[in-house]
Image (tube, rainbow, N blue to C red):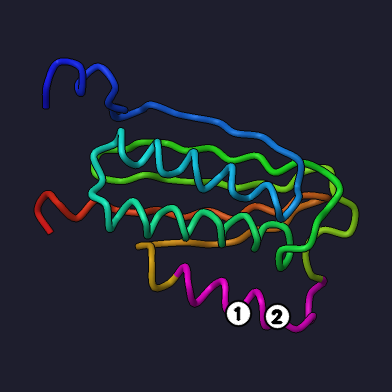
Amino acid sequence: MTDLDAADALRVGDRVELRFPARGDLVVLARLVTSAISARAGFDIEELEDLRLAVGELCLLAMGGGGDRHGDLSLEFSVSGEAIDVSCTLAGAAGVGRAPGDEVSEADRLGEQILSALVDEYGREQDDGSSRSWLRKQRRGHGA
């Protein structure tokens, strides 16, 4: 790394937040920010692309299959050692999530399969009026 590269790099403990209206056409913002963050955290191009696609799916899962929702999507990116953790929360939307016993939609199933192929860990949680999805992507370049 050159001095300029080191100055632009994200370090352990660095955190970036992004908030935007919960609209499917704006998920591209999350993907663009993900590309910049993963490049600055030292991920190679394949890992960067995997993470970019995974964050898009994460947003769509939080929105319940990709339909536009009232409310905001809030993403938090955290750099921790050789990994990036991403949390996506849909807040302020009425009728968020599924009721117990509801069937998982085909779009949700596909989104989870995509996440399973692209990241090391992921999950989903629902709580009073909000839906949270998260993922963790390890950098493979060191020790893997």
Q: Which element carries disc 2, helix, strand or loop?
A: loop
Q: Position of residue 1 (x, y in %)?
A: 11, 27
The part of the chain drawn in magenta is 99-115
Task: Residue 11 in the image: state x and y as whole percent.
Answer: 28, 27
Q: Is residue 70 above or below residue 19?
A: below
Residue with the mark numbered 1: 109
Q: Residue under circle 2? A: 104
Q: Secondary structure at mark 1?
A: helix
Q: Is residue 111 magenta?
A: yes
Up/down of 38 relative to 16, above or below: below
Q: Are marks 2 and 1 in contact (CB under 8 Å)?
A: yes
Three-letter amino acid code of the residue under disc 2: Val
The percent coordinates of residue 70 (x first, y second) are 86, 48
Res 46 quadrant in image: bottom left
Q: Sequence order check: which comes first, mark 2 or mark 1? A: 2
Q: Estimate how packed mark 1 is, as few (under 14), some (14 to 19) or many (20 or more) residues with alpha carbons within 10 Å.
A: few
